[in-house]
Image (spheres, helix red, strand yellow):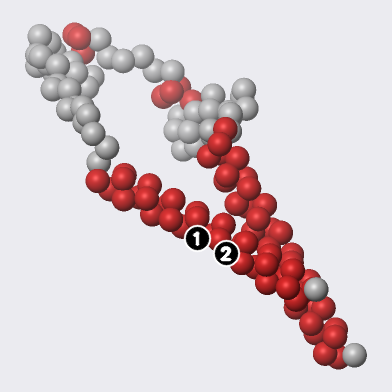
């Protein structure tokens, strides 16, 4: 009786773990198929925490006030704009490496779930 109860608890815990882990993988898999989830209509409209509410709606300083508003008049008036950031036409190596690593880990986790399911199906038969 004691052995059967221990096995039942062990198998039940493993099944619960597999179900929860599968739900987590399914939710991330849905994001891979359909793209990222849409944010609600009201999300993102509030200013960040720790900032003053009027700082989010403050206007940029005029050319007479200088580039940063605290400079004496005339320092940055007529100055050229900053150089634009160069555009990369290829995917950086770190992004490709991260993508391949994520793909390998996702395939390994899916394989692990299939292994656990096969293991439990063999034990229950």
Left or right: 105, with 91 as reference point: right
Dot 1 falls on a residue whose secondary structure is: helix
In the picture, measured across the screen, residue 50 lies left or right of residue 96, that is right
Q: Is residue 64 above or below residue 35?
A: above
Q: Callout 2: few (<14), some (14-19), or many (20+) C-alpha neighbours within 10 Å?
A: few
Q: Are marks 2 and 1 in contact (CB under 8 Å)?
A: yes
Occupied quadrant, residue 10: bottom right
* Foreground of the two, 102 or 37: 102
Q: Is residue 81 visible?
A: yes
Q: Is residue 115 above or below residue 75?
A: below
Q: Is residue 16 above or below residue 25?
A: below
Say the numbered circle drawn on residue 112. Answer: 2
The residue positioned 9% from the left and 14% from the top of the image is: 79
Q: Secondary structure at mark 2?
A: helix
Which residue is painted at 22% across and 29% down in the image?
Answer: 89
In the figure, residue 58 lies in which quadrant?
top left
Observer-nearest residue: 84 or 79?
84
Quadrant housing the C terminus: bottom right
Residue at coordinates 74% horizontally, 69% vertically from top-left?
Answer: 121
In the displayed structure image, the side of residue 105 where residue 79 appears, left or right: left
Query: What's the distance in space between the residues labelled 2 and 1, CA to CA?
Result: 6 Å
Dot 1 alpha-carbon crowd within 10 angstroms: few under 14, some 14 to 19, many 20 or more:
few
Q: Which residue is mark 1?
A: 108
Picture coordinates of residue 46, whole percent (x, y): 54, 27
When the figure is inspected, residue 54 is found, relative to residue 73, above or below; the finding is below
Q: Nearer the viewer, residue 117 or 24?
A: 117
Give the residue displayed 23% in from the left and 19% down from the top.
69
- In the picture, measured across the screen, residue 82 lies left or right of residue 110, that is left
> Would residue 71 be seen by someone viewing this image from the given angle?
no
The percent coordinates of residue 12 (x first, y second) are 78, 71
Looking at the figure, which quarter contains the N terminus?
A: bottom right
Q: Please identify the residue farthest to the bottom as the structure is shown.
A: 2
């Amino acid at each position: 009786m004691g052995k059967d109860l221990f096995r039942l608890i062990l198998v039940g815990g493993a099944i619960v773990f597999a179900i929860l882990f599968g739900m987590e993988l399914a939710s991330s898999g849905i994001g891979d198929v359909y793209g990222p989830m849409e944010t609600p209509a009201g999300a993102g409209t509030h200013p960040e925490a720790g900032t003053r509410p009027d700082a989010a709606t403050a206007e940029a300083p005029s050319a007479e006030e200088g580039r940063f508003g605290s400079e004496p008049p005339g320092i940055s008036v007529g100055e050229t704009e900053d150089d634009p950031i160069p555009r990369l036409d290829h995917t950086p190596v770190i992004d490709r490496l991260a993508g391949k690593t994520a793909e390998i880990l996702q395939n390994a986790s899916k394989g692990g779930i299939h292994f656990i399911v096969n293991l439990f199906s063999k034990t229950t038969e």
